[in-house]
Amino acid sequence: MTNTIPSPELIARFAAIVGDRNALTDQAEIAPYLVESRGLYTGNTPLVLKPGSVDDVSQILKLASETGAAIVPQGGNTGHVAGQIPRTGAADIVLSLERLNRIRDIDPVGNVIVADAGCILADIRTAAEAHDRLFPLSLGSEGSCRIGGNLSTNAGGTAVLAYGNMRQLCLGLEVVLPTGEIWDGLRRLKKDNTGYDLRDLFIGAEGTLGVITGAVLKLFPKPLGHQVAFAGLKSVADALALFDKASSLCGPALTGFELMPRLGVEFTAKHIAGVRDPLDTAHAWYALIDISTCDSAETAERMMSELLETEISGGLVENAVVAANDAQRKSLWHMRESMSPAQRPEGGSIKHDVSVPVSSIPAFMAQADAAVMAAIPGARICAFGHMGDGNIHYNISQPIGADRQAFLSRWREMNAIVHGIVMNYNGSISAEHGIGQLKRDELAEVRSPIEVDLMQRIKHAFDPAGIMNPDKVLKA
Amino acid sequence: MTNTIPSPELIARFAAIVGDRNALTDQAEIAPYLVESRGLYTGNTPLVLKPGSVDDVSQILKLASETGAAIVPQGGNTGHVAGQIPRTGAADIVLSLERLNRIRDIDPVGNVIVADAGCILADIRTAAEAHDRLFPLSLGSEGSCRIGGNLSTNAGGTAVLAYGNMRQLCLGLEVVLPTGEIWDGLRRLKKDNTGYDLRDLFIGAEGTLGVITGAVLKLFPKPLGHQVAFAGLKSVADALALFDKASSLCGPALTGFELMPRLGVEFTAKHIAGVRDPLDTAHAWYALIDISTCDSAETAERMMSELLETEISGGLVENAVVAANDAQRKSLWHMRESMSPAQRPEGGSIKHDVSVPVSSIPAFMAQADAAVMAAIPGARICAFGHMGDGNIHYNISQPIGADRQAFLSRWREMNAIVHGIVMNYNGSISAEHGIGQLKRDELAEVRSPIEVDLMQRIKHAFDPAGIMNPDKVLKA
């Protein structure tokens, strides 16, 4: 399906909905909306619209469906797969949710917050905190990413192990459909079995089925106890064994279990200000263990010391350090979160955001390492991530002294190798970042024809005019 | 859309797929498949098919789509809304999943079990237990209900507060589509953001979009500590306040918080063998508090005593008893689970399975009580349930001495009153039992036209021939 290229008259009709001040046509003002954070994609657009109400969004989509103009919803523009970037060479209109940034309600007893889609994630966390509650979604980009984008990509981050990803954190949605109709699904219910689960269809759809304008999000009691440890380990298999011990001991109090390789620790110690290796000796692998408890600080302390004492004396953990205060806890997490930026000064990095069944991580890593090293001798594999979720950011830094561009030109080739192994384990080629433009063609390769066909049927049923974020996730 | 009435020839073609032994045409053999547990609906069918493989199911649905014959999937036949019962006066074919009852795999390190849809829930729980793991879904009917039905109705039960309902307990599905095509979505991934969430569309669809034949379910570490208390309270508002205190103190260790009225305790003590009121004095309301901890038995004990000591001395809890051993814990839960059967000897009971936002429960209950008592003076309201989930089984026993049939004839009228108040709180008229036939027409009244329309579009996209459990959830 081909979308209309908006004429000056049509652009004026769209602009009239939001008012000229909120309709950008100046290419200098538009520029920041066209490039994503990693610089892999640059799109173009004749128009950026900044609606100020749900009704504005409704009128815009109605006009788009009537005229066939394509609409690309955008939140904080922090996505990694270019789902929020207009197509190159088309004339998609960008719909920025940034002005819809009001917290509509907060109910600490009911443990819910109701927010506009344009609210910044950090603002939601702060609002919860002010009511002695926790909103657990936490991401590197939380100071600029927006709730609508978090929902549309089913964002994950560092607290998924205990709290789930965005899908599990959302009770209700308000969505403007491609036709302009508004679905008010802003329910605050923990249980509701009345028909098909529309909410979860819009979550993770990357703006291809409609525009999320508001959401009911879950809040949680704020834990009193928080312990973070950094443990040196011999192998990935030992990390898996330690995860099994930790999750059996702590149950839902295990709020994080992150895997890091020696190389990643070296990179962060070398390149990130303030980071140093907290252990005296080198270890092949490391686990960051995060435990939170609601009843008391002592319960978390007791769990952490029991875990580490048992596993150090049993030989599973080679050495470990426990953060003594909040500053040290932040510092250990900072090292983990700096692992990707710390690769930059080491040259090009080919990235993968994959997941496999948790118990398959050691086998997957061994097989992927062998295949990558065979293809690019000297490649420096820096695979780290949310081990407890089975989600590894399998990144490959270029060989020392290699040509950056020549290395990066092998991105697709490396993807094919790594994703091929992921698929042998019935894994996912996008554990948390989504499909967008970057992985769209690959999606059709790794998922069965019937699965892609079911998605296409849903797309056509919801967006018959083909105006919602076309060519993202699925080929239009 | 009208379905084909199967001719003898067509019945023979269906029977040939599963073999004559597994194709029931004798009405005496068929009878148990036609009535649901509460006896509100009796359907009819010329044929019950018992496929022995996923391929059998595929061939059956393919033939049904080609010929227009309607198929009604059935698991353990324990559903409360007649979703599993063939229509009265039509000639729907019943597809029983009972022979597909194999546990395909269990991975205790990966914390997953893979099972056929026809597995009985209790068998899954036992298999998990044998590997020192917990499968948390627990229902009164767990000895006969089957996993496919649990998934298709997004079953809830007593452990939803901490573990979620069936939707949260499922990682992957295998589904035979109405066309006979098989979707293999049996993934074991905790994180997977690759396209639309098909899994959650089939979960809770009550067999109207396809037949679930297999599932990957989550397992959890088995808690070491388990405490159950029974607390006497002045009011529903106090129960809400106590829930807030308990969930702040225990976080995810609070595994159950059930509300019960004095009347319900009296009914169970009077009618259920072995049940007695565990407290010496009468209280207007009661909470059953269930706490589970993984690290040690002591942590649960400490939490429970801290909660009760604080709230008894603070005056929120009037009196409380803590179960001293597993037998006593079971006995307290038995009282709660007997609350519905205990109403039977008291005459007719008009039932509601509703949810509202947790913080609205006291206001909802007060308003509903006033409206019901105004409509039927002398009615005995026995509203109990999963307070922590906002889910109340708002049941109404007939006035003493009233005519049972005359009282029950006011079922729809009472539903309209109670559900009307539920909708004022943006609640749900079916928190855990689903829609089926019982609430189908009401669904169209309580949900917006756009919401029902989106469901219809999905239905038509997945089942163009209209053969999958027609007239359930949505009008065909």
Image (spheres, coloured by chain):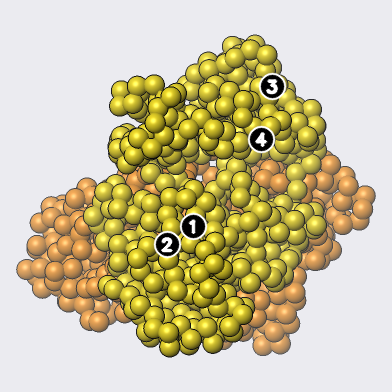
Chain colours: A yellow, B orange
**Picture quarter with the C terminus of chain B:** bottom left
Horizontal and vertical percent for residue A273?
69, 32
Q: Quadrant of residue A108?
A: bottom right
Horizontal and vertical percent for residue B89?
27, 80
2 vs 4, front mark: 2
Q: Of callouts 4 and 1, which one flags the residue occurring earlier in the amino acid sequence?
A: 1
Q: CA distance from mark 2 to mark 3?
A: 43 Å
* Above or below for B145 versus A461: above
Instruction: Identify the element where label 2 is drawn.
Output: loop
| Residue at the spot of label 2 | A43
| Residue at the spot of label 3 | A278
**Which amino acid type is marked by label 1?**
Val
Which chain is home to disc 1?
Answer: A
* Above or below for A395 versus B52: above
Which chain is home to disc 4?
Answer: A
Which chain is home to disc 2?
Answer: A
Q: Which dot marks residue B316?
A: none
